[in-house]
Image: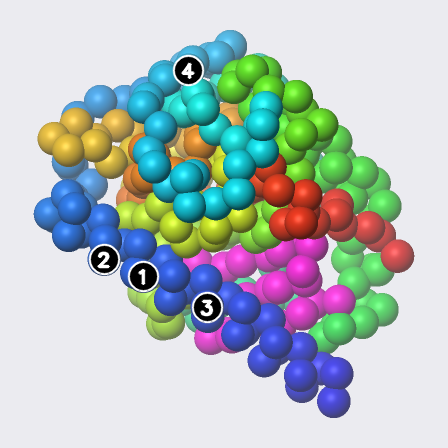
Amino acid sequence: MKSARAPREVGRKWLRAAVLGAAAALAALLLWGSPGGDDGVTEVLARRGEVLPGRFIEVPCSEDYNSHRRFEGCSPTKCGRGITDAVITRDEARRIRSIAEKGLSLGGSDGGASILDLHSGALSVGKHFVNLYRYFGDKVENIFSEEDFQVYRDVRQKVQLAIAQAFGISASSLYLTKPTFFSRINSTAARTAHDEYWHAHVDKVTYGSFDYTSLLYLSDYLDDFGGGRFVFMEEGANKTVEPRAGRVSFFTSGSENLHRVERVHWGTRYAVTIAFTCNPDHSIADPAFT
């Protein structure tokens, strides 16, 4: 009975997120017109072949944060987007990708986008989500190790510190929030709305708890996959980040950073989304190996 209930519980949570995401995408289309094709990018913020110690672009904050409780010294007053290759090593990225590969070996979407959330246990299986901890039980202990979870925690802490430094806030004022998850994207045709990852959206609108969003890329653009670049959408001046294993892209989560991901044309793109909130009521704990 637990295994039967778990897929429905996790599925409902992700369905709500998908509906919010679709609404955000529709708002983006109405605001900007067409989201643009993959050739609509006019500026590359970070090329795959570059090794960036750090690049930061400040942009005016949107009003999205005004409709949420504000936390002095944390809620965004300085907004922008940053890219760095100096926080996470390529070896750490390889180890983190291994965690994703092991977890996703238990399932995977029938469409092109699969999700693994070590915090909630959400795992794509076919056209649905299951809670991997309940659904697979003790088998999970044979898939992951304590070392895996320690590496995951260490990487999360490094990303959190980098975000705090870039925006001039205390790392202790940031809290990990949900959903924080691995994604595996390939060129398989979408089967459900969960597979349509390419729509433009605003994280603060889709997930109200988000204040700062980060992505750690775990594979290389043009070596491991084609397409799949990250695009910040600005009227007449889209800007893109080319994924590189170990590269961290981070930004404030409001409408000032409307974004999308290009469709993957070939190969497999791995990344992990790590989200932070200023509201301790929306915090989640690091996953634990038990």
Say which amino acid is labelled 2: Leu
Q: Are marks 3 and 4 in contact (CB under 8 Å)?
A: no
Residue 69 image point, x, y percent: 53, 43
Residue 107 image point, x, y percent: 59, 67
Q: Are marks 4 and 1 in contact (CB under 8 Å)?
A: no
Residue 289 image point, x, y percent: 84, 52
Residue picked out by circle 3? 16
Other-residue count near label 4 (Cα within 10 Å), few / some / many at <14 / 14–19 / ≥20: some
Other-residue count near label 2 (Cα within 10 Å), few / some / many at <14 / 14–19 / ≥20: some
Mark number displayed over residue 22: 1
* Residue stretch rendered in magenta on the structure: 113-133
For mark 1, give the secondary structure: helix
Residue picked out by circle 2? 26
Q: Who is closer to the viewer here, 1 or 246?
A: 1
Q: Is residue 73 left or right of residue 185?
A: right
Mark number displayed over residue 56: 4
Gap in Å between the C-alphas at discs 3 and 2?
A: 16 Å
Residue drawn at 24 percent across, 36 percent down: 233
Outermost residue to the right? 290
Q: Is residue 286 magenta?
A: no
Q: Are marks 2 and 1 in contact (CB under 8 Å)?
A: yes
Q: Evaluate whether residue 223 shows in this view.
A: no
Say which amino acid is labelled 3: Arg
Quadrant placement of the N terminus: bottom right
Quadrant placement of the C terminus: bottom right
Other-residue count near label 1 (Cα within 10 Å), few / some / many at <14 / 14–19 / ≥20: many
For mark 2, give the secondary structure: helix
Gap in Å between the C-alphas at discs 4 and 2?
A: 29 Å
Magenta region, main secondary structure: strand
